[in-house]
Image: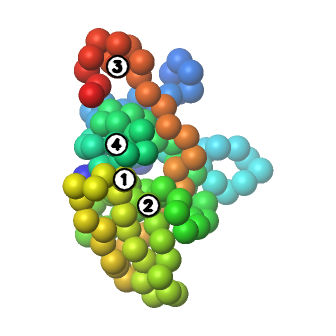
Amino acid sequence: MLKMSRKKAKPIKNNILPFPSERNRLITKPRNTETSLSIATVQMSNDSFKDKGIWEGDYLVVNIGEKVSDGDIAVIKMNGHTTVKIVYFISNECVRLEVANEDYAYLIERLSRIEIIGRVFRIERDLQKQKKGALK
């Protein structure tokens, strides 16, 4: 699971935001003054999206508040935890939440029980860690 943090962070090289504990944090900053959207980065902490080429340790960049459509990868708050799921709307009341790893089952939840934080629009990977073999 991913934990949320709304602490302010200063951008570093390549506009990546640092994480206070280096893992599992949602860090936000204003995207621009023309929209009400903010962006956030979330670091993957498991292999639930390996079939989409998203690895443990990758950074997902999220548009907070952006509308999510069927098939979008989104950051979701559910049962007090923040998680990443592929979203499919079943009705005005229910949503199917999937991951991209056949080892995990999908979930069906009422929209009233979850909070869709935003849509993932970019994936960033630390190539130094990959080169050293830290990423699988």
Of pointers 2 and 1, the one earlier in the residue sequence:
2
State the CA–CA distance, disc 3 to disc 1.
Answer: 21 Å
Residue 64 position within the rendered picture, expressed as x and y whole percent measured from the top left: 55, 55
In this rendering, is residue 74 above or below 51?
Answer: below
Q: Earlier in the sequence, mark 4 or mark 3?
A: 4
- Whether pointer 2 and pointer 1 mark residues with C-beta atoms closer than 8 Å, the reply is yes
Q: Quadrant of residue 125?
A: top left
Which residue is label 2 attached to? 86
C-alpha separation, residue under disc 2 versus residue under disc 3: 25 Å
Residue 15: x, y in percent?
56, 26
Q: Please give the residue where the numbered disc 3 appears in the rendered image.
A: 130
Q: Mark 2 to mark 1: distance in Å?
A: 8 Å
Judging from the image, what secondary structure is the residue with disc 3 in? helix
* Residue type at numbered disc 3: Gln
Label 4 near label 1: C-beta < 8 Å? yes
Q: Is residue 27 above or below residue 102?
A: above
The three-letter amino acid code for the residue at tag 2 is Ile
Task: Tell me the residue at 48%/71% (across/down).
Answer: 88
Compare marks 1 and 4 and give the one earlier in the sequence.
Answer: 4
Work out whether 133 lies above or below 48: above
- Residue 29 visible: no
Quadrant containing the C terminus is top left
**Camera sees residue 22:** yes
Which of the two discs, 3 and 1, sits closer to the camera?
A: 1
Residue occupying the point 53% across, 18% down: 13
Q: Secondary structure at mark 2?
A: strand
Residue under label 4, please give it. Answer: 50
